Image (cartoon, grey):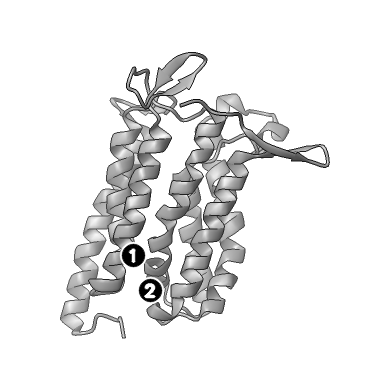
Amino acid sequence: MHSPGSVAFRIFGLDVMWYGLLIGGGFLLATIISYLRAPKHQIKSDFILDLVIWMIPAAIVGARAYYVIFSWSDYAGDWKKILDIRSGGLAVHGGLILCFLVGYFVCKHYKQGFVRTADLVAVSIPLAQAIGRWGNFFNEEAHGMQTDLPWAQIIDGVGYHPTFLYESIWCFALFWFLLWFDNRHRSFNGQIICLYMILYSVERFFVEGLRTDSLMFGPLRQAQLISLGLILIGIVLYVVLKKRAASKGDTGLS
């Protein structure tokens, strides 16, 4: 597969990039789904709009800051380059971390349950990721090592593992699984966000092993270490929250 280029179209002399369109479209779709499903989690739909106002800048700042910090040698002293996100350079882990930190304080300010809200938004986060990952395809970035597989991403005549595609497929499947599980089997608050942390991180750990553009810490890539940490945290939180709900005889779902 070949990228047709990073520019989707031009308007008033300005290039509109596929990267931004796909990330923005994924975020918008995830917001709509969370807005419509909020009453199921005993959350007012309007609160989702209040939350998104804070989540958009948090996601962008967190994702960009994370990417720049861990690639500082490429950006040192060049503020124009640091602020230019139109051509890529956003790290998922950074965006998620800052979003959840900011989300905690937003929930506290509006007197909404943070864990309950996290369960709600965790269902649609992988859908946004699945769509946004295609931005890497158009930018010809974040690909894997060379391969001659028939579905390889071709860049300058060379085939590479399309890691964006692997993650996109997994995240689409994860979205449908979490949606089904939330509707049919959710038994305590915090269950969905824990499952998201575990299952997304499992995929990220293995797909990251195929990439060639990651920072290394010993034998592992930085994102792999973070993924392992999130898997561990997710499992511990799952057990703790489940036991807490059982001991109180209250799942918190009603």
**Image check: 16 left or right of 174?**
right
Q: Secondary structure at mark 2?
A: helix
Q: Nearer the viewer, residue 80 or 27?
A: 27
Q: Which mark is residue 116?
A: 2
> Percent x, y for residue 121?
43, 65
**Image check: 31 left or right of 253?**
right
Q: Quadrant of the C terminus?
A: bottom left
Residue at 50%, 45% in the rendered image: 132
Direction top: furthest residue: 157
Which badge, 1 or 2, comes first in the chain's sequence? 2
> Percent x, y for residue 143?
43, 28
**Image check: 93 left or right of 14?**
left
Residue at 62%, 29% in the rendered image: 75
Q: CA distance from mark 1 to mark 2?
A: 15 Å
Q: Is residue 7 visible?
A: yes
**Image check: 86 left or right of 216?**
right
The three-letter amino acid code for the residue at tag 2 is: Arg
Q: Is residue 91 above or below residue 193?
A: above
Direction right: furthest residue: 12
Q: Which mark is residue 235?
A: none
Residue at 52%, 60% in the rendered image: 29
Q: Nearer the viewer, residue 196 or 67?
A: 196
Q: Is residue 8 above or below residue 44?
A: above
Residue at 40%, 69% in the rendered image: 120
Query: Residue at label 1?
Result: 179
- Write down the quadrant of residue 244 in the picture: bottom left
